[in-house]
Structures are given as structure tokens and as C-alpha cells.
Image: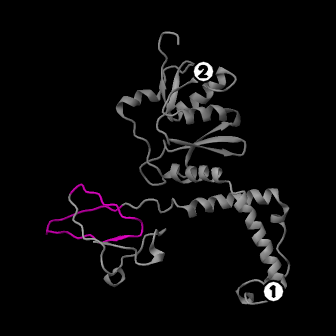
Amino acid sequence: LVYPPPSEADTLPFHSSEDLGSRELGEPLADLTLKPGDLLYLPRGYVHQARTVSSEPSLHMTVSIARRHTWRDLLELGLRGAIEAAAADDVAWRRSLPREYLSYMGAVHSDSADRRRVAFERTAHRLLSQLLTSLPLDAACDQFVCSNLMHERLPPFPANADSAKLEAAELTPRCAIRLRTRHIARLAIEGDAAVLYHHVENTRVYRELAEPASVAFAMEALPALDRILSAYPKYVTVGKLPLETDAQKLDVASALVEAKLVFVKQPVNSER
């Protein structure tokens, strides 16, 4: 039996509900019979009540997805970063609160006509409006993926035919590399470092690693990392990476190979 969300507050919820009784559920939307191997998708917040149609044992598994992958979660992270950036750039964010604000702000003063309330609210609104025009959405998306998705994903499973491509007998500028999958790694800029977060080292235990796995590079490697990330699913010749010396190119490629983020293709014998 499938039921709609019990209330507006239960539509697309952030947390699973407790078991609900028949009075809370009302009339079902659908009465469906699933066969072995069937999959039923329910939008988040919809309720299902499973029962068998015979006396034989039956087992089903419920998997919840995307509860912590919402606009609220992304913007919460983005606003936190915007506030930190604003406080670093604008002294107004670093000023102390008015000395007497407790005497005119708060629930007990909500009906007060004190002029200081107007000034206090005007200042808060002005500061908040700055955030909406300077919200670092790109950085927020990168950090959101790096700190959550890359930390929680299952590790990649290479097919037998691909296992040999994860190592290079000898990595040279003529070798070519490409990402194992499109979203195996995500680039984030952290201070003076370009950091690639990935899920290669994850286990099958949820967040067993204390921190998401990552590989840090000097900012000079950023053009090469951009080239490799944007080239997928094509291979990129190591010697053609946009860095000044072969040693720098090999350093970047070697770090990616060591982290098992890329497949390696050996050069053919003939000159290209």
C-alpha cells in the first residue's frame, strides 16, 4: 500500500518518520503487488506499508536517497563560506553588536516601537543582502560534493579488463591517461592548493574513513588537472599537459596513477 505524505511538513522530509498508524495515514493512493526482482520508486515523504499476499515468507529492502542532497544543504554550506568571506573583506561584519541590544531585541521586545530596533534590523538586512550578491555557488558546489558525495560513495569497481590499466610499468611523457569514471574525483581550491577529492579509498561501510580521501597539488598544476578532468572520456598524453617541464607533467600524472584515479595507456612503438 502506498500513501501520500501525511502532511505538508512531511513532503520531501530530511529525516525518516516513525512508524505511522492507520489514522495518520488515511486512504492509500495505490495497492500494488510486487514480484521478485521488482523495484518500486516512491518520492521522498511517501509512505509504504508492505504485506505478503500468501503465507510464504517475504523480504524487501527500502533504500532512502537524496535526503541530505538538497538545496538547503548546498546553500547552508555556501552561506557559511559567504559569511566568512564577507567578514574578511568588510569591517562592518566584524563590528561588535550594539552594547544595549538586549534591552530592545528579542521576543520580549518584539512589539516595541524602540527606534533602535529599526536601526538594528536595517543593519542585519543590509549585511544579509550582501551575501545574496556574492554567494560563492561554484565553490559551494565543489565543497558540497567533496565533503559529502565523495566521502559517502561506494568505491569504484574496475572490470577485469581495466585492472591492468591502473598501473604503468614505466610512466613516460608519451603515455596517455584518463579518468576512470566521469565523477571519480572533484577539484576544489583550498587556500594555495588544488585538491582532488575522490572515493577510490572508500570502503563499503558508510563513512568509515574519518575524512574524505584527497590528493593535494600546488596551484601550478591546476591547468593540467583542468585538462585531465575536462577531457573525459578521452585520453590525454602526459607530455601534452599544459605545464612547463616534463618533470612537472610526470609528477602530476604519477600522483594520479598512484591514487588509482586514472587509466594509463602505453604508447605505441611507432612515432605519433
* Classed neighbour count for the residue bearing mark 1: other residues with Cα under 10 Å, few (<14), some (14–19), many (≥20): few
**At x 77% / y 59%, what residue is drawn?**
86
* Classed neighbour count for the residue bearing mark 2: other residues with Cα under 10 Å, few (<14), some (14–19), many (≥20): some
**At x 48% / y 76%, what residue is drawn?**
9
Q: Position of residue 235 (x, y in %)?
A: 51, 27
Q: Which disc, if any, is residue 239?
A: 2
The answer to whether residue 239 is left or right of residue 169 is right
Q: Which disc, if any, is residue 103?
A: 1
Secondary structure at numbered mark 1? helix
Range of the magenta residues?
36-62
Q: Amino acid at mark 1?
A: Ser
Q: Amino acid at mark 2?
A: Gly
Is residue 178 covered in magenta?
no
Check the image and report above or below for 121 versus 43.
below
Check the image and report above or below for 184 versus 49.
above
The answer to whether residue 26 is left or right of residue 177 is left
Of callouts 1 and 2, the N-terminal one: 1
Secondary structure at numbered mark 2? helix
CB under 8 Å between discs 1 and 2: no
Task: State which quadrant residue 81 falls in.
Answer: bottom right
**At x 60% / y 52%, what residue is drawn?**
141
Q: Position of residue 126 (x, y in %)?
A: 78, 68
- Residue extending farthest left: 55
